[in-house]
Amino acid sequence: MALTQDFYIRKRKELMAALPEDSLAVVYAGNSVPKSLDADYPFYASSHYRYLTGLTEPLGVLAILKKNGGTKVRLFVRKPEPDREKWFGLYIRPEEAAAISGVEEVRTLDTWPDWLEKNLTGSVSLYVDGSLPENQRVPVDQEWSDLTPYLVDLRLIKDEEEVAALREAIAITAKGIDRILRAIRPGMYEYQAQALFEYVIADAGSEGPSFETIMASGKNGPILHYETNREVMADGDLVMFDLGARIHGYCGDISRTAPVNGRFSKDQRALYQAVLTAQEAIIQKYQVGAKMAEVQAFTREILWEEGRKTGLFAPDAAIDDYYYHGIGHSLGVDTHDICENRNFTLAPGMVITCEPGLYIAARNLGIRIEDDILVTEEGPVVLSEMIPKNPDVIENIMKRA
């Protein structure tokens, strides 16, 4: 379900309620980056801008003025350029931007400097999205404070519309994973499995992958952000895939690990079960009031405990040799959704990944199992519970004809 106009109106109101009186908040869409003489890299609007407007075009500016007990909201979009639009498509028109965002007054970008000069008086403090690189911002010749902390507080807590969008992104991701499990076989290239996943999620209506798909087989499994995806998947190896679909601006983020030939070896199954047992226990720690640092500490303890039972750890090893990343991150408009640090306290409405892993490079073993968890007063809800992770179920899906 696409987010409604009411959602964007509500989030803008919540933002301005948090800011002090006499404030002007400015959020930019960002601009496209040239790839070659006559082509740009794919453009993704600033996450803050999309979150507050629902718009995805470059060079937009959202301005919200809080002054004299009231607010003014203005949106500025590109002025039509008929000659360029013949080549690159129509720019969004002010009336279209108003219909999506709920901003009643939408103007063209050429009027932005005069509006800013008129409204940014000496008594008004300027707040700018400091997370956007300087060369992506519309220039403002004025001292400013960072708007990002206020947006962090908003974006960490998801409302019902956002959770529904995340559920849809995860459901599409599940379709792609099912197709991967049914297709993987020895001799297949990692990029072929990647292409299959990305075809399926596109066919299901997604906006595309949430991030660069990781399809790491064999010796590549222990590499956390392996994205080359050029190796042949070999008989007897595992393949660890970390991927997701994006829809309505929201991201799925799932990791699963499977045997290339459809059957876990004894050692592979032992290590896989260690990670799965650990994950099941860790998910129960995703309770309101828990600190992520405490969850991370528990993760290290239980992965060490379960991993040692396999007999695959070296006698002089420590957990850092086999587990070397965080247990989870906020998920939303960004895959690694905005937060000031990883030691936040869990609260209702947060959606946090749970992604324990064990990696033994000497044995070509890289196993990660990742799910997306909604924190509620009643306990953790696994939004991705439909995606199989039991090793017997995975083997059954992968049975060869």
Image (cartoon, rainbow, N blue to C red):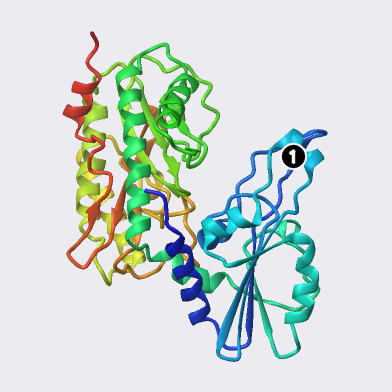
The residue lying at 75 percent from left, 54 percent from top is 79
Establish if 210 lies above or below 161: above
**Of the pair 129 and 324, the residue shown nearer to us:** 129
Q: Please indicate whether residue 303 sits to the left or right of residue 92 in the image.
A: left
**Of the pair 108 and 299, the residue shown nearer to us:** 108
Establish if 244 lies above or below 112: above
The residue lying at 67 percent from left, 84 percent from top is 125
Establish if 216 lies above or below 11: above
**Of the pair 147 and 60, the residue shown nearer to us:** 60
Residue 394: percent from left, percent from top: 23, 27
Residue 105: percent from left, percent from top: 62, 68
Quarter of the image that includes the C terminus: top left
Q: Please indicate whether residue 373 sits to the left or right of residue 52 in the image.
A: left
Residue 322 visible, this angle: no
Establish if 34 lies above or below 142: above
Where, by quadrant of the figure, is residue 276 drawn?
Answer: top left
Question: Mark 1 = which residue?
Answer: 85
The residue lying at 36 percent from left, 65 percent from top is 293
The residue lying at 79 percent from left, 46 percent from top is 81
Residue 97: percent from left, percent from top: 59, 56
* Pointer 1 local density, CA inside 10 Å: few below 14, some 14–19, many at least 20: few
Amino acid beneath label 1:
Glu
Where, by quadrant of the figure, is residue 6 drawn?
Answer: bottom left
**Of the pair 295 and 143, the residue shown nearer to us:** 143
Residue 333: percent from left, percent from top: 47, 54
In what element is the residue under mark 1? Answer: helix
Looking at this rendering, what residue extends furthest in the top direction? Answer: 401
Q: How many marks?
A: 1
Q: Please indicate whether residue 3 sits to the left or right of residue 377 in the image.
A: right
Residue 385 visible, this angle: yes
